[in-house]
Image (cartoon, rainbow, N blue to C red):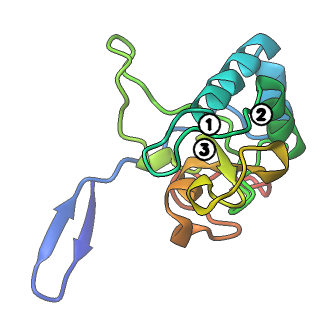
Amino acid sequence: MTVHEDAAETAVVPFEVPPPPLWRTFEDFLDGVPMRDIRYWCGRKAVRANRDRLMSGRPKERITTDDVVSVLTDARGRSSHCGSLAVAGAPMHQETRKPLAWAHIGRRIGSLDHFVARIDGGPNTIDNLRWSCHWCNTWPSERIPGAKDHGAIQPDGA
């Protein structure tokens, strides 16, 4: 728990401290995760990117697992916006597999991002893709190079 003081009153706001990261470098990630698991994870991201969307419909172009693996490895697992190592999956409840709160580690969760969003007419092609952390992909106004919040893992070890 952390305390935030307001001019009028003091409020206690829950704040989760990020757990220690599983990997500090992209090499640690590659050494610790079998390639079949990385390909499965990237394949799920490709399926999601190829889905029909409410505002932009189904993409004309379809990306593949190999496309996502290429984007991930070209970026060395680092968010193109903040530079955090973003190779973790979103947290899930172990029994129900339902999503859990992720804000405290949002910069560690890997995400596929489009340079030009599909809703803005961007194609679903490898040259329009980049690696991002989930935090930066969700909140473009929070794209801060070298950010150290939300569980970020920066190259300097911070």
Question: Which residue bears the numbered disc 2?
Answer: 68
> Which numbered dot is residue 49?
1
Q: Which amino acid type is shown beneath numbered disc 2?
A: Val
Vertical arrangement, residue 10 with respect to residue 49, above or below: below
Residues at circles 2 and 3 in contact by the CB criterion of under 8 Å: no
Residue beneath the point at 70% across and 27% down: 42
* Residue 120 percent across, percent down from the top left: 60, 63
* Residue 16 percent across, percent down from the top left: 36, 47
- Mark 2 or 3: the one toward you: 2
Q: Residues within 10 Å of mark 2 (few under 14, many from 20)?
A: many
Q: Report the front residue among 1 and 65.
A: 65
Residue beneath the point at 72% across and 59% down: 115
Distance of mark 1 from mark 3, alpha carbons? 20 Å
Residues at circles 1 and 2 in contact by the CB criterion of under 8 Å: yes
Residue beneath the point at 36% across and 40% down: 101
Mark 1 lies on a secondary structure that is: helix
